[in-house]
Image (cartoon, rainbow, N blue to C red):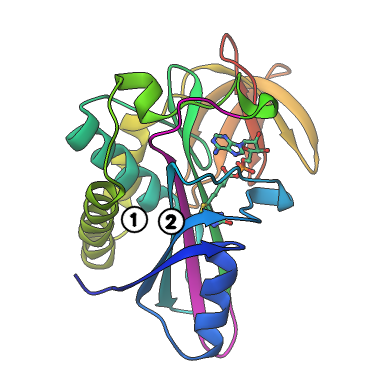
Amino acid sequence: MPYKIHNFSKLTSTNDKARKFIKKGIFNAVITAGTQTKGRGRFGRKWHSSHDGLWLSIILKVKKSENAKYFTFIASIAVARAVKKIAKIDAGIKWPNDIVYNGRKLSGILTEGIFGKESYVIIGIGLNLNQSSFPNSIKDIATSLRLVTGRKYPKKYFLNSILEEFENLCKNYTSKGSSSIISEWKRCCVVLNKRVAISSVSGGFSGMAINVNKDCNLLVRLDDGTLKEIEEGDVTIAGFISQ
Ligand code: BT5
């Protein structure tokens, strides 16, 4: 394992701690927290992080030209593979950063890039493992592996498995480029060829999700026939519980 693992019982957010590590010159490292008091999602949204989940961040040093979105894709595949291996269920990936089961969110990824003279990505991964219930605000959209399979799981199994898959996928990406990552991602994706509604900072759109391109952006055929490239946002799939 090329990553040194640093375990903490309680942090504000493993991504915050990762930024502090980078300032101290530490990278190729993993940070875990038993619980997070200010776990966050995209756009500063709250991420509920009780003791029952796995919360980690991977810190990598990257090239200045790197597209951080590849690491969200790599982490999503790594989580889906680990879930398949250990919990024996087929989780899906919902663009851009969710791992879902039966329309409910099992896991979310928050990738943050720090680009400058030296560049880093922090890949924050949250996986709901042993929760038997969720706060009211997310009880209709979240799920855990315990709720899905009726079993409890040691966090360490998932940590090791996710990191092993992540490392293998990164090696593939470095040696063969992004196409193998994107094709596996597409096989796990639950959004493609579905009718979707997108809410993004540039507005709301609806249409058919038809592909992701080499930049990991979602291509949607809008109802008026135009093809729209979506760089960020939240996707709701017709017939799924909404975000
Ligand atoms: C995400 O954001 O899904 C990224 C979540 C990343 C969490 C990890 S944990 C380790 C690392 N440290 C951090 O501080 N963060 C990362 P987004 O797509 O914006 O989704 C956020 C939304 O998911 C919230 O607004 C809620 O609706 C929902 N949510 C919050 N907590 C959840 C949970 N535990 N399980 C499922 N859904 C949740």
Assign a secondary structure to mark 1: loop
Q: Is residue 65 visible?
A: no
Real-space CA distance between mark 1 and mark 2, rounded to the nearest whole angstrom: 8 Å
Question: Which part of the image, by quadrant, shows the N terminus?
Answer: bottom left
* Neighbourhood count class around disc 1 (C-alpha, 10 Å): few under 14, some 14–19, many 20 upward: some
**Which region shows up in magenta?**
115-134
In the figure, 134 relative to 126: above or below?
Answer: above
Which label was assigned to residue 178? Answer: 1
Which label was assigned to residue 63? Answer: none
Residue displayed at 51% across by 91% down: 24
Provide residue 141's location: percent of width, then percent of height: 58, 23
Which label was assigned to residue 70? Answer: 2
Query: For the residue marked with disc 2, what is the amino acid?
Result: Tyr
* Neighbourhood count class around disc 2 (C-alpha, 10 Å): few under 14, some 14–19, many 20 upward: some
Provide residue 103's location: percent of width, then percent of height: 49, 19
Residue 71 on the magenta segment? no
Assign a secondary structure to mark 2: helix
Labels 1 & 2 near each other (Cβ < 8 A): yes
Q: Quadrant of ligand 1?
A: top right
Provide residue 25's location: percent of width, then percent of height: 47, 90
Does the beta carbon at disc 2 come under 8 Å from ligand 1? no
Query: For the residue marked with disc 1, what is the amino acid?
Result: Ser
Near-viewer residue (241 or 94): 241
In the figure, 239 relative to 153: above or below?
Answer: above
229 left or right of 74? right
> Mark 2 or mark 1, which is nearer the start of the sequence?
2
